[in-house]
Image (cartoon, grey):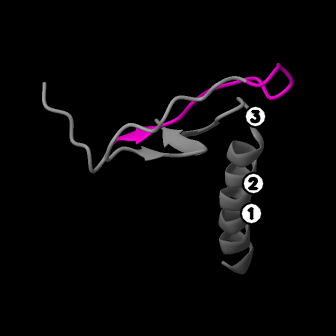
């Protein structure tokens, strides 16, 4: 299996209320991100749903506005 490093992203999951953990160094040429969209669901590093809910509300309000203008 060949991994496409240009499209790969790394996310580290952790509990922000727990004691600090030692985060390993980033993997060479793979971008480390705080959130990622996977199969249409936004996942954040501490399993918070704020970003996903914000996206759903934004898309819904845009579609509602289009329906109102029609």
Labelled pair 2, 3 in contact (Cβ < 8 Å): no
Which of the 4 image quadrants contains residue 16?
top right
- Residue most toward the right? 17
Seen at 71% across and 60% down, the residue is 58
Q: Nearer the viewer, mark 2 or mark 3?
A: 3
- Residue 63 spot, x, y in % from top left: 65, 64
For this orientation, the residue located farthest to the left is 1
- Earlier in the chain: of badge 1 and badge 3, it is 3
Image spot of residue 18 (x, y percent): 83, 19
Q: Residues within 10 Å of mark 2 (few under 14, many from 20)?
A: few
Residues at badges 1 and 2 in contact (C-beta under 8 Å)? yes
Q: Residue 44, image x and y in percent? A: 65, 38
Q: Which residue corresponds to the image point at 21% horizontal and 41% vertical from the top-left? A: 4
Question: Does residue 5 appear in the picture of this structure?
Answer: yes
Q: Residue 49's quadrant in the figure?
A: top right
User: Gap between marks 2 and 3, in whole Å?
Assistant: 16 Å
In this view, the residue in front, 51 or 61, is 51
Residue at numbered disc 1: 61
| Region of the chain picked out in magenta, as a range | 8-20
Chief SS of the magenta region = loop
Q: Nearer the viewer, residue 20 or 4?
A: 20
On the image, numbered disc 3 is attached to which residue? Answer: 48
Q: Which residue is mark 2?
A: 57
Q: Residue at x 69, y 50 (%)?
A: 56
Residue drawn at (65%, 59%), measured in percent from left and top? Answer: 59
Q: Is residue 32 left or right of residue 67?
A: left
Label 2 residue SS: helix
In the image, is 56 to the left or to the right of 38?
right
């Amino acid at each position: 299996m060949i991994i496409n490093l240009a499209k790969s992203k790394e996310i580290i999951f952790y509990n922000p209320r727990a004691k600090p953990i030692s985060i390993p160094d980033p993997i060479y040429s793979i971008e480390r991100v705080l959130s990622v969209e996977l199969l249409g669901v936004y996942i954040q590093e501490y399993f918070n749903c704020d970003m996903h809910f914000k996206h759903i509300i934004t898309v819904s309000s845009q579609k509602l506005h289009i329906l109102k203008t029609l």
